[in-house]
Image (tube, grey):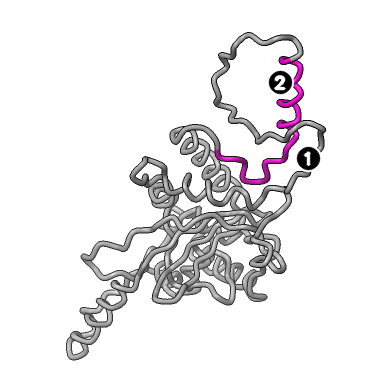
């Protein structure tokens, strides 16, 4: 059955500042969408065999998943589901800090602006919004000073990522909010390969901020080569094609949260990928 999600994916053009698709991307989407719609005007009565045939090429698989078509796209591979992305993002370490929260704690400073001291008094860091509200009784002068400090702190830009603060559980919760913020506004998704058969799934919002996951397929590809070699003399009907590129009966390599990504920028490495909010 033809999924409505596929038609929506083929009707949507991925967008991200600083990133571009192949010039033929839009035409390829339109051709694929037209071919699918021509089978039957009623989605419930689609010819599954013909649909499967049309969606059997690496490019059609890629486009049907709503992925951006770029020079380095890993055509024919399948991206992880939101559930798989979430599971990898929320995997805890020994101190129960999730993979996403840990990456956020290391990454958040990249969208901060260096703030020059603007008052005659000493500078202060942005306090945690989860600090206890129970404070000792203070004099009126002390309270006025405290109020000025809070007002000054509230004007310090926290950047696109925000600032990790509070106990582990709070940082985990805030990181999860960030995860859903990106998922809800994503406008660019793509798959590409890294050396040693590592598949990377990348999503970004229109401004370029986003997240990455990776899947190590080196072991799986090695097994596939061994399997194909042993079946050279067997009937070709024993060779089973799989969308995700894994061997039948084998457990697919897990997706691992790789971290957050910044908008593309000139001299990014030299500047530490830091962006003004």
Coordinates of residue 15 in the picture (x, y in percent): 66, 60
Q: Please state the extent of the stretch shown in magenta in the rendering.
A: 142-164
Q: Give the left or right position of residue 246, taking residue 70 as reference.
A: left
Residue at coordinates 67% horizontally, 69% vertically from top-left? 20
Name which quarter of the figure residue 221 lies in. bottom left
The disc, 1 or 2, on the residue closer to the chain's N-terminal end is 1
How far apart in space, not on screen, are marks 1 and 2 (Cα)?
A: 17 Å
Relative to 182, say whether 218 is above or below: below
Coordinates of residue 130 in the picture (x, y in percent): 55, 26
The residue beneath circle 2 is: 146
Q: Quadrant of the N terminus?
A: bottom left
* Pointer 1 local density, CA inside 10 Å: few below 14, some 14–19, many at least 20: few
Relative to 27, say whether 276 is above or below: above
Q: Give the left or right position of residue 260, taking residue 97 as reference.
A: right
Relative to 64, say whether 105 is above or below: above
Residue at coordinates 65% horizontally, 36% vertically from top-left? 125
Name which quarter of the figure residue 70 lies in. bottom right
Q: Nearer the viewer, residue 54 or 151?
A: 151
Residue at coordinates 67% horizontally, 54% vertically from top-left? 206
Q: Is residue 189 magenta?
A: no
Coordinates of residue 14 in the picture (x, y in percent): 62, 61
- Residue furthest out toward the bottom: 233
- Residue 15 seen in this snapshot: no
Secondary structure found at label 1: loop
Secondary structure found at label 2: helix
The residue beneath circle 1 is: 117
Q: Is residue 144 magenta?
A: yes
- Residue 257 seen in this snapshot: yes
Coordinates of residue 177 in the picture (x, y in percent): 53, 38
């Amino acid at each position: 059955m033809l999924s409505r999600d596929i038609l929506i994916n083929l009707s949507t053009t991925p967008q991200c500042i600083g990133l571009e698709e192949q010039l033929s991307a839009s035409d390829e989407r339109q051709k694929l969408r037209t071919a699918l719609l021509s089978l039957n005007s009623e989605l419930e009565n689609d010819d599954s065999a013909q649909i499967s045939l049309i969606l059997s090429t690496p490019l059609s698989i890629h486009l049907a998943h709503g992925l951006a078509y770029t020079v380095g796209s890993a055509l024919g591979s399948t991206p992880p589901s939101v559930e798989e992305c979430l599971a990898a993002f929320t995997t805890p370490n020994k101190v129960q800090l999730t993979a996403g929260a840990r990456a956020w704690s290391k990454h958040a400073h990249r969208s901060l602006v260096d703030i020059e001291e603007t008052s005659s008094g000493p500078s202060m860091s942005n306090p945690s919004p989860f600090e206890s509200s129970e404070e000792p009784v203070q004099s009126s002068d002390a309270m006025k000073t405290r109020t000025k400090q809070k007002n000054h702190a509230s004007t310090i830009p926290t950047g696109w990522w925000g600032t990790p603060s509070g106990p582990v559980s709070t940082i985990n919760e805030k990181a999860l909010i960030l995860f859903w913020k990106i998922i809800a506004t994503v406008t660019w998704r793509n798959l590409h390969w890294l050396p040693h058969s590592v598949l990377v799934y990348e999503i970004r919002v229109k401004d370029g901020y986003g997240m990455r996951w990776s899947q190590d397929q080196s072991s799986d590809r090695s097994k596939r080569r061994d399997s194909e070699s042993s079946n050279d003399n067997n009937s070709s009907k024993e060779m089973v094609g799989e969308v995700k590129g894994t061997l039948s009966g084998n457990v697919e390599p897990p997706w691992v949260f790789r971290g957050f990504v910044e908008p593309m920028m000139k001299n990014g490495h030299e500047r530490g990928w830091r962006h003004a909010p």
